[in-house]
Amino acid sequence: MKKIILFTFFITILSFLQAQNSVANVNVETVKLNNGFYQKYQYDSSSECNCSEKTERDFKLAERLLKNDILDYNIISYNIDLGKNLNAIQKLFYAIKQDSTIIKLSIIEWSKLSIVFTDGFDENSFFNAATQVFAKIEKSNVSEFLWQKNKELKLVYEDKIRNLQSVNK
């Protein structure tokens, strides 16, 4: 329940800040990106997003991480700095909602993001778009993210990695 509230709060804050940016006439150039799922979307700050409507997908993405999420899917984590291009951030989160390969998002203190995903996730496309939207994004250690999020999940993840490595030997 905390995740749903946090995710909803995050979207609300983004909408509010985006409105402030519009009033201040903040103008950021349209981002030109390569081919990929996330490149179908425009991440500029000058056009409206019209993407703040909450759907069931918002709530599913924001559900707390569970042991089976770690065991059944892939996970990647990033250190992020949201920056000030809030309209573009809102558009990126809208694109994430459209990406059926993403199972869950998890955010820690607005500076760390993890994505739980299936094998079809276009990580390069996402990262390319995210580098244009966030002030900073860099891959981080999943174990460290999970340690901060839930120590039990960190242990589950590390066991999964050990098992995969022993199978691949």
Image (tube, rainbow, N blue to C red):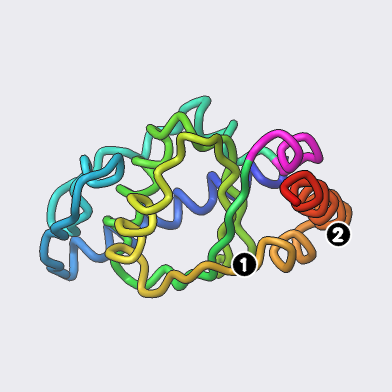
Name the residue: 19% across, 52% down. 34
Name the residue: 75% across, 47% down. 164
User: Where is residue 62 shown, x and y percent of the image?
Assistant: 60, 41
- Mark whose residue sits in front, 1 or 2: 2
Name the residue: 25% across, 38% down. 50
Res. 82 image quadrant: bottom left
Residues rendered magenta in the picture: 64-73
Q: Can you name the residue that lies furthest to the front here?
A: 169
- Residue topped by disc 1: 109
Badge 2, how many Cα within 10 Å: few under 14, some, many 20+?
some
- Residue topped by disc 2: 151
In this view, 60 is above or below 94: above
* Left or right: 91 as drawn, with respect to 102: left
Name the residue type under label 2: Lys
In this view, 145 is above or below 157: below
Q: Is residue 35 magenta?
A: no
User: Where is residue 13 shown, x and y percent of the image?
Assistant: 44, 57
- Asked if the residues shown at circle 1 and circle 2 are in contact, with their CB atoms under 8 angstroms apart, the answer is no
The majority secondary structure of the magenta stretch comes to helix
Name the residue: 45% across, 49% down. 11
